[in-house]
Image: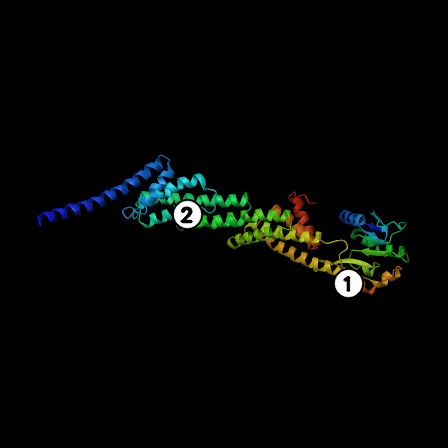
Amino acid sequence: MIYVVGKSESLITELKTLASKKKVGNQDIEIKNSFVFDPSVSAQIIYLLPDVSKSIADVSAKSKAKSTLLVAESPNACKTGSSINFVIVENKLKFEYNKTNAVKSGLKTNDDFKALAINVE
Amino acid sequence: MSKWRNIFKTFTCSIIMLFVVNGFAQNDKLNRAQQLLQSKNADQARLAIDSVIVHSETKGDFVSWTTRAYIYFEIYKRTDKLKLHSALRDTIISSLKISNSLKPDETFATNNKKLLSNIAAGYFNLSKVLLMDSMNHKNSLTAYNKFKENFAVAEPGTNFTARDIEYYLAVGSLYSDVFNKDNKNTDAQNVAKLALLKVLDIQPENPSANINLGIMYYNQAVNLGKGLDYGADFSQIDVVQENIVKLAKQAEQFIIKVYKVDNKNVKAVEALHSIYKMLNDKAKEEEFKKKCKELNIKLD
């Protein structure tokens, strides 16, 4: 399950399109959205939109060791608990990656992934 | 001796008479050709005039050549007006040029000019038909250049700047529409680009050319993004992003020129909002979002 917290109709639409076309192994992808974080939702990915960026540290603490990948798109998100953070660099969309946060979340990491990202520790 | 003299005199007179009669005959043929033209019998008139213009008595007369041009014009109107390559039209033009070279009087010079202008206008109309109806830009351009060539002979010193802008803008708009509807049609894209850049060569601030070019680059970028599959690898995404940014910046260059001259140009404001969104420039995207609202532009 991908759990999107915050407001972005276009992202939800796009993720739902992706979910209708792709599977992870044999499993369907489910998209859930709420405007505020609900800790009872069990998701593999939590995507925090900019309007809820203040809650990154809180969400990070509540989802620790649940093997949940925390994704955000706000400045310094990787320093406040997010494993992946989308940033704009020279008009292009890039992503920051904090391996430490990923490991703390109970995720196994692949170093190939590191090579593609802007690494933040 | 006296008898011989008489024979010689008679013979000489006969020869002279023969030439005079022959000359009269050619002038009669010219008159007949003109009468046939007036009575709308152009096909018969054509036969008569074609012998007039090869005869030594009449081939040096501008009247013969102008008459020939008008006779051929009658036939041309009937059969060849929509043909790009017409032997009849070529004959009209060459006949008028010969007539002009024989220093015609004012009446004939005026008539020559009128007919050549008419032929030139025919080429111009043909260029429009070939462009709008047949989408044949190559033939259309040939017709347009023929229009200019002939009109310049009829009206020396004519300034074609406004016409050039009108023509190339029509080509550019038409083909950019085709490309915007089908981004795989790179031929249409190239034709539109060339035509619109030609307009900008003549008039760098032309708003339609700038807007059309900008929107073409923007749409090209949009389609690059749409072409990405969910399973695309990161290196491919990077290359596509790079190209999208390049195209969006090119689009911005053209649209911003229009916006600087007219900051209420609806198309420019809307396009700039989309371009800045594409360039992930949040500040400018917001700025133009506000401007769109002020101008009652509905955004998707």
Asked whether the residues under the numbered discs 1 and 2 touch, taking CB atoms below 8 Å apart as contact, a structural biologist would say no
The label shown at residue B90 is 2
Instruction: Give how far apart the Cα atoms at labels 1 and 2 are.
Output: 68 Å
Picture coordinates of residue A11 (x, y %)?
A: 77, 49
The label shown at residue B133 is none
Local packing at callout 1 (Cα closer than 10 Å; few below 14, some 14-19, many 20+) is some
Using residue A63 as the reference point, say whether residue B164 is left or right of it: left
1 vs 2, front mark:
2
Local packing at callout 2 (Cα closer than 10 Å; few below 14, some 14-19, many 20+) is some
Please state which amino acid type lies under the numbered disc 1.
Leu
Please state which amino acid type lies under the numbered disc 2.
Asp
* Residue at horizontal 81 percent and vertical 59 percent from the top: A84
Quarter holding residue B293? top right
Q: Do marks 1 and 2 share a chain?
A: no
**Which chain does tag 2 point to?**
B
Residue B258 visible, this orientation? no
Count of labels in the image: 2
Picture coordinates of residue B96 (x, y %)?
A: 36, 47
Q: Quadrant of the C terminus of chain A?
A: bottom right
Picture coordinates of residue B84 (x, y %)?
A: 48, 46
* Residue at horizontal 36 percent and vertical 44 percent from the top: B112
Picture coordinates of residue B184 (x, y %)?
A: 64, 51
Compare residues B4 and B28 and report the one nearer the observer: B4
* Residue at horizontal 80 percent and vertical 64 percent from the top: A112
The residue tagged 1 is: A116
Residue B278 visible, this orientation? yes
* Residue at horizontal 12 percent and vertical 46 percent from the top: B6
* SS assignment at label 2: helix
Using residue A107 as the reference point, say whether residue B86 is left or right of it: left
Residue situated furthest left in the rendering:
B2
Using residue B159 as the reference point, say whether residue A70 is left or right of it: right
